[in-house]
Amino acid sequence: MSNLQLSLAVLGGVILAAVVLYNAWATHKSAPRKADASTTVPSADATERREPGFDGDLLGSEAEGAGTGTPTAPRVPDKRTGLDALIDVVVTLVPQAEVSGDAVLAAMPGTRRVGSKPFAIEAQHATTAEWESPRPGQRYRAVQAGVQLANRHGALNEIEFSEFVLKVQALADAIHALPEFPDMRHEVLRARELDQFASSHDAQLGFTLRATQAAWSPGYVQQQAAHLGFVVGALPGRMVLPGAEGVAAPLLTLMFDTQAALADDPEQTALRDISLLLDVAHVPQDEQPYQRMREVAQALAQAMDGVLTDDQGQPLAEATLDAIGNDLASLYVALAERDLPAGSGLARRVFS
């Protein structure tokens, strides 16, 4: 072999090695960032999102969203739980004599819904005079039934009101009481007014964090979020930041692609963006949820080489974030003036 041939062979080998090394480097660079195997991401022990219900969990397992859960501290009862004329149509039934809890339970309808609205029954204890969920072995002097005027599915309509009347009448017949129903037109107008207020004051604020360099694996996202207090939720691709003790709803929710979370090998799945969500009406203002949201978003952006954007992919400037905060301050005032302060049981029921 001549010197020229030998030189060409050596040069070819060097080029081939360089191509192999480059391809390996490019593959490594484009691979999603992976979680540190030595770190464990905490999981939620409770359910991630639960539809706000009446005192005593009268909605039962049929409530929409039940079983989807929130990893938070045990719920502290709201001072205004149970049926409330502010957001419910309430009908009181006074039987001819005290009625047993067993009789009330036996007469309750099989579903706790009227159309798309929660339906509930409470009973007034014969001894304590407190309103509670009917219990076996107890005696009650009165019963009241109610249906919610409005929620995120819309306002109570005439058909739903009529269904409510039928349910209550059947209950009244069973416990020997004579119901007095309010005027349907009046209640439907109340429902529409409440729905109009809720629609114009409903805020579910979302930020998007987009990768500027390497993509992220689901495990990497979970690990970085866990450093900031998030726990894995019950639904694939969802994490939640629990609120303080006694706060029923999560402070923030972090979401990424469900299919990526369910992949056979999630660590080989590339995520280019994740979302942060604040359901404003569900979290008390004194938790400072928006300030916490900004802090979390900025911390994740720095740690994960990401940029904070709106839903259209436009970067969010500090001035824009400040303006959003000012708008939220006005929203909190409006909710409180309506006697539906953010984070209260009534607010969570209306905005559900």
Image (cartoon, rainbow, N blue to C red):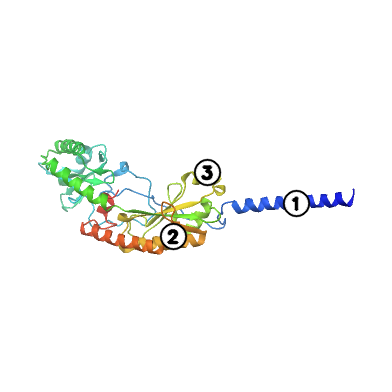
- x%, y% of residue 313? 44, 53
Q: Secondary structure at mark 2?
A: helix
Q: Pointers 2 and 3 in contact (CB under 8 A)?
A: no
Mark carried by residue 297? 2
Q: Secondary structure at mark 3?
A: loop
Marked residue nearer the N-terminal end (1 or 2):
1
Q: Given the current orientation, which residue lies at the most extreme front position?
A: 4
Towards the viewer: 55 or 20? 20
Q: Residues within 10 Å of mark 2 (few under 14, many from 20)?
A: many
Marked residue nearer the N-terminal end (1 or 3):
1
Q: Secondary structure at mark 1?
A: helix
Mark carried by residue 15? 1
Q: Residue at x 39, y 62 (%)?
A: 292
Q: Residues within 10 Å of mark 1 (few under 14, many from 20)?
A: few
Of tags 1 and 3, which is closer to the observer?
A: 1
Marked residue nearer the N-terminal end (2 or 3):
3
- x%, y% of residue 30? 59, 51
Q: Residue at x 20, y 41 (%)?
A: 104
